[in-house]
Amino acid sequence: MKRATRFFRFLPFPLFPFAVSLVVLAAPPASGQNFPSRPVRLIVPFAPGGGTDIIARALALKLSDKWGQQVVVDNRGGGGTIIATELAAKAPADGHTLLVGTTTFVINPSYQPRLPYDTLKDFEPVTQIAFQPYLLALNNKIPARDVKEFVALLKAQPGAYNFGSPGTASGTHLASELFKMMSGTSAVHVPYKGTALALADVIGGQIQFIFGTILATAPHVKAGRLRGIGVSSPKRAATLPEMPTITESGVPGYSATSWAAVYAPAGVPHAVLNKLNTDVVEAVRSAEVRERLAADGAEPVGSSARDLAAFVRSEIAKWATVVKAANLHPE
């Protein structure tokens, strides 16, 4: 401040107000009260129409109303979510570009050896939006009525059963690998181009089981086309309360969920991050967004940034262990 005073002392008087204004403009904002000052871009690493996109659009609509600035959903699918994540990592650190990260966000660090960003260093956690349990579903001809019976069946016939997923290293694939690892069983993975195709083959008997999201899988269970035997979350699912958890019915400690969270590029001012957390959490807990989440089989969270950071670190460590145990490598 003393240097600035000496500098101003030698300025011609007419230039003094101009110099002061430059200093004020160059100073960082003291609070996030003026944020956002323009439209906000919410990058979604999937094509339009999927569950993550639907959640993001419900959140964007609520935030647009609150902020008086449009929140634009920018779908950037492909590359195993790496394209969208890199785009967000390199965006200006002012809070006007945000990323919706999902389970793949914490799987890629161990599955993809050369990411063009650092998952922990290049992002600021804002809040976890929601999570959705997976539902373990069997073909109706499989002679197992619960998780204990199914584990016994897999152990009795190692490698005789196949399971499907929408792709290698997807959340549903690794949920299955974690189940195998924790139950001491073996089965063969069959990757598909999408959950619908995998579910069709479980129903038809070409493969024997799947860990699918509740949204995609529960209708087939309720219609009698598949047999559901457990949900993957630590607690029973709010949208399927009659279904026991896998951890209570055969594999203690088992937990795997599909989830979504909001991140900002590293370097966003703390005041802006605080406002983002407050406003996004408020939107997540609103009646409109909660109803949208429930319709997709998801449950709202609205965590603190610190809790999200701790969750992400634990998830990265967990899935790194699973990726190594399953000996998975990019195709």
Image: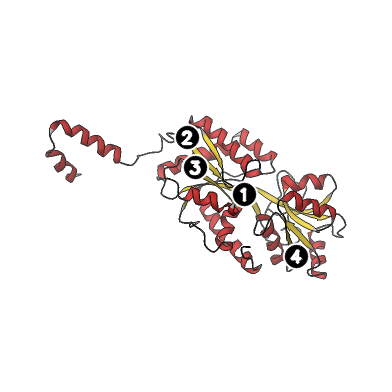
Residue 40 image position (x, y, % from top left): 48, 37
**Quadrant hosting residue 50:** top right
User: Which residue does the image show at 75% across and 65% down from the upper left?
Assistant: 188
Amino acid bearing label 1? Trp
Label 4 secondary element: strand
Q: Select label 3 or label 2 by which is in front.
A: 2
At mark 1, the secondary structure is strand
Check the picture and name the quadrant holding the N terminus.
Answer: top left
Above/below status of 160 relative to 84: below
Sequence-earlier tag: 2 or 1: 2
The residue labelled by disc 1 is: 259
Q: Quadrant of the C terminus?
A: bottom right
- Discs 3, 4 touching: Cβ within 8 Å: no
Q: Element under label 3?
A: helix
Disc 3 residue type (three-letter): Asn
Can you tell which quarter of the image residue 59 is in? Answer: top right
What is the CA distance from the residue labelled 4 to the residue labelled 1?
25 Å
Which kind of residue does numbered mark 4 sit on? Answer: Val
Q: Which mark is residue 277?
A: 3
Instruction: Specify whether residue 215 is in view.
Output: yes
| Circle nearer the viewer, 3 or 4 | 4
Q: Which mark is residue 39?
A: 2
Foreground tag (2 vs 1) = 2
Q: Nearer the viewer, residue 67 or 80?
A: 80
Other residues around mark 3 within 10 Å, as few (<14) / some (14–19) / many (≥20): many
Residue wearing tag 4 = 188
